[in-house]
């Protein structure tokens, strides 16, 4: 995962934020030269928080830059961290030796300063982060996993020289206290989000082959962005935009999209995207209702897709049955779509509706209104969601049950569960993958008319997949 996601996870979910705030109450006059306890891990985890959500992602290694030990991180979202006392208003220089794909950083109040390994080398390399402690008397230093097994050794924190102070810089994050989501407007989408298990389609057609441009997991992790369709917004969110006119993913596709497609292989090119006969492989997942041999062949079993977003714009031109609608999340199978989640706002309405469609395998669609109505003649929903209003959705697949929830202001606004017992997805030759973004459901309007949404959270989880 060549991104800053594990560091954001550290701030948002691990409890280190509260830890650093408590540590910040230590009086500055009690602090002399900053001390990192056990900087080379010669005493194991002494002094460090061992951040590992999987149970297998962190270890003490015998492969060291100096001495005989180092910290090894090998799983998504794993990290090591330590609170260090400092003097307020002082510029510091943090260093560590890193081998593999990792991030070295420091959290100062609600700001994060970091340096990301820009190459995946088998050699040890010293990374450096310069920062100012501002009005804080304690900070949190950390190292994070970034897509490849990584080792950290020989942390050091010193008062910066004049040259270092001149070079002081920071990455700006919008903290939750200011209404942000721990995202930075200064970073690419692949640095703010873990996109190492997604690829992207946009309506662009750079090579002129009349098919939607596609960008791999590696492209996204390395920082791909496109100011037309896929970029970081001024509030740090991931903006996805799709015009009515543009290239489509295949000759059989009716609509354009700027949409992420789940790729469990995480850039491993030895695993194909899919098998043509519909059999599952390690890049895709299956329901736990599928035969045992299919579960063993798949990359994961069952799954949850959770997103927080705001729809910024919908189409306002075109046929009445198409105007204003966009798919913002879905599960796709080999041929069909177990669920598509729609947002729709009609012209002249202040608010939009949310509804879902379940496609029976080789069969018809079953529609369910969640908020408001999908009808082209619907009235303005009094409980609807306006453009630029943030909300979340959770799509959860487990066995024969497929549920969707709409959440806003920490309250469940709507929910529904489909019974898939007779839907035909419990067979040997079918596979699943999540999709998220903006799948424009209008091909009849002005070619420059568009749909757009900004995502603030995007998380996919599966059983048997890390």
Image: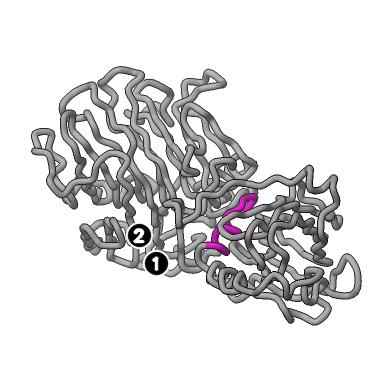
Residue 451, percent across and down?
34, 31
Quadrant holding the C terminus: bottom right
Q: Secondary structure at mark 1?
A: loop
Specify the principal SS of the magenta part: helix
Figure coloring: one colour
Q: Is residue 442 above or below residue 455?
A: above
Question: Of callouts 1 and 2, which one flags the residue occurring earlier in the amino acid sequence?
Answer: 1
The stretch drawn in magenta includes residue 439: no
Mark number, residue 25: none
Tell which of 89 and 169 is nearer to you. Answer: 89
Mark 2, residues whose alpha carbon is within 10 Å: few (<14), some, or many (≥20)?
some
Q: Residue beneath label 2, please?
A: 427
Tell which of 363 and 389 is nearer to you. Answer: 389
Q: Secondary structure at mark 2?
A: loop
Please name the residue shown 35% across and 48% down the image: 330
Q: Is residue 268 above or below residue 300?
A: above
The stretch drawn in magenta includes residue 4: yes
Residue 404, quarter of the rendered image: bottom left
Mark 1, residues whose alpha carbon is within 10 Å: few (<14), some, or many (≥20)?
some
Tell which of 453 and 428 is nearer to you. Answer: 453
Residue 147, quarter of the rendered image: bottom right
Question: Which residue reaches farthest front?
Answer: 29
Question: Which residue reaches farthest right?
Answer: 67
Residue 231, percent across and down?
51, 35
Q: Residue beneath label 1, please?
A: 291
Please indicate, yes or no, whether residue 422 appears anywhere in the rendered image.
no
Please name the residue shown 29% across and 24% down the image: 443
Compute the Cα span from label 1 to label 2: 7 Å
Region in magenta = 1-11
């Amino acid at each position: 995962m060549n991104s800053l996601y594990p560091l954001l996870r550290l701030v948002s979910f691990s409890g280190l934020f509260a830890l650093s705030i408590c540590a910040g109450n230590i009086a500055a006059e009690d602090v002399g030269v900053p001390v990192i306890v056990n900087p080379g891990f010669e005493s194991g985890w002494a002094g460090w928080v061992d951040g590992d959500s999987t149970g297998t992602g962190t270890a003490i290694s015998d492969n060291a830059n100096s001495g005989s030990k180092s910290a090894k991180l090998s799983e998504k979202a794993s990290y090591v961290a330590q609170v260090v006392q400092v003097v307020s208003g002082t510029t510091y220089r943090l260093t560590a030796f890193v081998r593999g794909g990792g991030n070295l950083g420091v959290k100062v109040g609600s700001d994060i300063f970091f340096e990301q390994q820009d190459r995946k080398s088998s050699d040890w390399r010293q990374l450096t982060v310069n920062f100012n402690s501002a009005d804080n008397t304690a900070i949190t230093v950390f190292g994070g996993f970034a897509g490849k097994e990584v080792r950290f050794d020989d942390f050091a924190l010193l008062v910066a020289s004049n040259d270092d102070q001149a070079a002081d810089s920071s990455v700006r994050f919008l903290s939750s206290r200011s209404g942000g989501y721990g995202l930075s407007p200064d970073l690419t989408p692949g640095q703010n989000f873990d996109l190492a298990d997604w690829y992207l389609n946009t309506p662009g057609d750079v090579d002129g082959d009349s098919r939607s441009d596609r960008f791999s997991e590696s492209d996204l992790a390395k920082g791909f962005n496109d100011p037309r369709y896929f970029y970081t917004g001024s509030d740090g969110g991931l903006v996805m935009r799709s015009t009515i006119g543009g290239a489509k993913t295949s000759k059989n596709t009716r609509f354009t999209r700027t949409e992420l497609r789940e790729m469990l292989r995480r850039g491993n090119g030895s695993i194909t995207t899919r098998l043509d006969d519909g059999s599952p492989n390690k890049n895709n997942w299956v329901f736990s209702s599928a035969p045992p041999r299919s579960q063993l062949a798949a990359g994961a079993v069952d799954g949850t897709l959770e997103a927080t977003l705001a729809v910024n714009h919908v189409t306002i031109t075109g046929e009445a049955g198409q105007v204003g609608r966009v798919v913002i999340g879905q599960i796709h199978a080999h041929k069909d779509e177990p669920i598509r989640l729609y947002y729709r706002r009609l012209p002249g309405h202040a608010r939009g509706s949310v509804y879902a469609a379940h496609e029976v395998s080789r069969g018809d669609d079953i529609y369910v209104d969640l908020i408001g109505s999908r009808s082209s003649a619907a009235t303005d929903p009094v409980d609807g969601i306006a453009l630029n209003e943030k909300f979340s959705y959770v799509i959860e697949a487990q066995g024969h049950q497929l549920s969707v929830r709409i959440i806003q202001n920490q309250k469940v606004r709507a929910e529904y569960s489909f019974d898939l017992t007779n839907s035909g997805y419990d067979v040997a030759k079918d596979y699943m993958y999540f999709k998220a973004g903006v799948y424009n459901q209008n091909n009849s309007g002005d070619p420059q008319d568009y749909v757009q949404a900004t995502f603030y959270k995007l998380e996919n989880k599966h059983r048997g997949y890390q």
